[in-house]
Amino acid sequence: MDKVYNSKQFEEDIYKKWEESGFFNPDHPDYSKRDPYSIMMPPPNVTGVLHLGHALENSLMDIMTRFQRMNGKKVLLLPGTDHAAVATQAKVEKILVEQGIKNPRQEFGREKLLEKIREYAENSKSTILKQIRKMGTSCDWSRLAYTFDEARGRAVNEAFVKMYNDGLIYRGYRVVNWSVKGQSTASDDELVHVERPAKLYYFKYTKDFPVTIATTRPETKLGDTAVAVNPKDKRYKSLIGKTFEIENFGNGVNLKIKIIADENVEMEFGTGALGVTPAHSAVDFEMYEKQKAKEDPIGLIPVIGEDGRMTENAGKNYEGLTVLEAREKLVQWLKENNLFEKEEDIMQNVGTSDRFGDIVEALPKTQWFVNVNKIIPGRNKSLKDLMREAVTTGHRNNPEQKVKITPERFERIYLNWIDNLRDWCVSRQIWWGHRIPVWYPNSKFQNKENKIYVGVNPPSDLENWEQDSDTLDTWFSSGLWTFSTLGWPNETVDLKTFHPTSWMQMGYEILPFWMARMILMSTYLVDEIPFRDVYFHGILRDETGKKFSKSAGNSVDPLEIIEKYGTDALRFSLISGITPGNDARFYEEKIEGARNLVNKIWNISRYIIGNYQLPITNYQLDNNLILSLADNWILDKLQNLKFEIKFDLEHYQFSQASEKLRAFTWDDFADWYLEVCKFEKSENKDKILGEILITILKLWHPFIPFVTETIWTEMGMEKMLIFEKWPSYTLDLFGGNQPVKDVDKLMGVKSSPDSLEFKNEFEIIKNIITSIRNARSEHKIEPTRKVKAVIYAGEKKELIESQAELIKNLRTGIGELEIKEKGEKIENAIYIATEKIEIYLIGALDEAKEKQRIEKEIENLEKLIKSGEGKLKNKEFIAKAPEAIVNKEKEKLENWENELQKLKEQVKNLK
RNA sequence: GCACGCUUAGCUCAGUUGGUAGAGCGCUUCGUUUACACCGAAGAUGCCGGGGGUUCGAGUCCCUCAGCGUGCACCA
């Protein structure tokens, strides 16, 4: 084994071996009797390559996967990719435009452009899959899925048709978000709100119009059909219900304006009166629908076209102008006609397309929508109800079918989002995506009722039909992900075995996009929740707190980090220091630290393998071994560690688990126990070190699979580590040897009562050693200089005598060691008082330094004593605090006072 | 406007039923002794954002204020 662990030398081969072993596949015969555990990998978009966020997700999922697999589950981690409809088409079009093709859609036409996009997507897909392998992710490649492959396409059609037949999908003329640049609709969630300064214009339609209105978009007023006021607003109350004929507005347009009442109008904003443009505002459109329902309809006049220019309805003077040109022109006209009152500067949020980047226009269009409020036939519930139920009472009021959210606060955020949910527009005018499975009779063939055909498969007389040219929102297919990947709509064994899936993790930024849609689709179509637990991770940011992004120029390529530091270091650095739902910063020093840790584990193993005869089978310590104090101490800690790591991982405390492992491995095992083993020889050491090394390799394996598997091989193990079982633990190593099943019950039990003593006694030895080192250091005694030590050990005499070799050898620089129960004070010696033990170091006293050192300790003790006395003087504390706490306080105070007294006496004699 | 989060050591962050404040990095001093300088030993640094309350006891629970950040809605 080399001095330094070289990740590049091993990683590729190991991944290949794992893959070939078949252990990634839950169908492996060795797993046949196991309970299932499943994770569906959130499919990365085929728009590019993996970034750090994906690397984080892969780390989290693979830790869970390996952990569950070692704990005896039949684990399916199913990999996949997402065609990402708009995102991919937008990306490829952008590239083509950069290559000089002005309008790719026009120049290539549907088929050829799709071919270009497919080529790009396939390319990107294969890169992504390679990167997932690089991350060490132990997923089942035999079940690889793609949202746009045949099986998933079938599921999409099936879902659409079922929803259509249940009346949950309808075709309607409604106001939608329209990206002029992308020439497509977008759902509300695909908008990114950008704040920018705008002007609020105040004016009247005509001189004698009774109300002044305020708007940031005067040009849309050419399509106004009403003015809305708050019904409580006294200023306007008398006008409600009246209709005004406006002639020649903006030079050439006639308007019919009805004054309507709407509670959502804010009296304080602007003039408290709002010009209603049903065609170009989602809110106004709602008023339009409300009026229609009240049978007091108002008009709907689209004045902006899909090209972003004013339509014929805007009048001859405006037709063909862009929105901005029209705005200027109308404001000009208002000023000329003395209708203009004033303008104000305000900040405004405008919706932009997340993919095309342009400002989105609201305009009315005939589109396909999912009705989230309609009662589902036979269920007495709407889709909204289903989405709500899944996280509250449980699906069908079954607590077993409840999605548990980590961290909990996201539950409220989710429910809040559901409350504000509007009908979901699912049709898109782009070409890359699942074609809507709807056919219209073509001109050659007019069936009697002009009926449309909606079906999973095309109509048999295809020549008479024309398929809807639109495609589906990408989230329609990804909403099916947890079960479309398992063979749905067929009733497959996989579906029965692995659904609902066990765990899902995702970034909180896609909470509404994805989680809600998966819940919607799954509860409606499969009658099950999609996953039992969902975990939200935060966003990774750079060292200054900025999000990583290509446009900001701070993006980091995970492959470069792997190249430089290794996959294990990357994985460890990504999950250390993170907490559920909170953002985390990621920077080079963190990776270095992780790399150092990996190397430390490598060297610990290298040392043990090189110096001891390790058992090469899975060794269990027997009860007959004669163990030293240090042996007991470390083995006891190891017992605790095993269940604490398990507990933490079961509760998704990834960072905490890794931190505990690090502390045990480095601080307890390497810095203390291995150092002890250099002096404390016994024939048991081979077995004990073997047991500890084997155990920590297993515990580390989910986090850093490559280095642990490599060491495992170096140890000469026959089977691979990936297939090993999680180390079992007992509450009491030397007592009942009962395996502990319920980890939860053990929380708070830090150690078994019997072994507590061993632990504390070794802590006493550690304490003595540290105190001696400290005194030497404070006295600046040269490390090579040996001193004589005398210890007055009181009742601990036997204990300390038994550990004399350790005290002498563990870098304390003690030549001669004398241990007595008690004795006379020794002059001209360094004096150390620890709890009930006194130590003299003879032959190296520097009175000034000694005085300084002891005075410092006295000061510390006095502080402690003061606070301790304060507590114990408080009668209420004595009366009300639990007895155990009070006794502990008393004991501590006694020890401190004892120590203080000794130190004070000592310091008296120093000059 | 509504909601949520954050504020703890120089930096980045932990801190699970309330019981003497923790880690990593950085810093200081010392050090190449049978793994590791990607190392070891010893150390310094905290009114746990301010104020109030509950409690014998608050970083932890409640109220309030401030600063920062995020989401949602409005934005006419």
Image (cartoon, coloured by chain):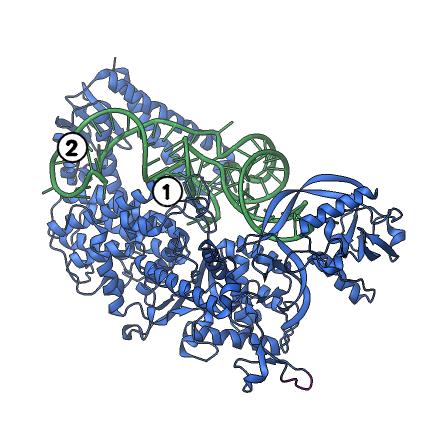
Chain colours: A blue, B green
Q: Earlier in the sequence, mark 1 or mark 2?
A: 1
State which region is magenta.
A445-449
* Residue at the top extreme of this rendering: A911
Residue in the picture at 81% in, 54% down: A252
Expressed as whole percent of the image width and height from the top left, the position of residue A490 reads 46, 80
Is residue A460 placed above or below A519 in the rendered structure? below
Q: Nearer the viewer, mark 1 or mark 2?
A: 1
User: Can I make out residue A432 in this image?
Assistant: no
The crowd level at tag 2 (other Cα within 10 Å; few <14, some 14-19, many 20+) is some
Q: Are marks 1 and 2 on the same chain?
A: yes
The crowd level at tag 1 (other Cα within 10 Å; few <14, some 14-19, many 20+) is some
For badge 1, the amino acid type reads Tyr
The quarter of the image holding the C terminus of chain A is top left
Expressed as whole percent of the image width and height from the top left, the position of residue A47 reads 44, 59
Classify residue A120 as left or right of residue A641: right
For badge 2, the amino acid type reads Ile
Residue that label 1 marks: A587
Expressed as whole percent of the image width and height from the top left, the position of residue A407 reads 49, 53
Mark identifier at residue A819: 2
Residue in the picture at 37% in, 71% down: A143
Distance from the alpha carbon under mark 1 to that under mark 2: 51 Å
Q: Chain of mark 1?
A: A
Classify residue B61 as left or right of residue A262: left
| Front position in the image: A670 or A854 | A670
User: Can I make out residue A741 in this image?
Assistant: yes
Q: Main secondary structure of the magenta part?
A: loop
Classify residue A460 as left or right of residue A235: left
Expressed as whole percent of the image width and height from the top left, the position of residue B68 reads 54, 37
Is residue A548 placed above or below A875 in the rendered structure? below
Is residue A675 placed above or below A875 in the rendered structure? below
Element type at mark 2:
strand
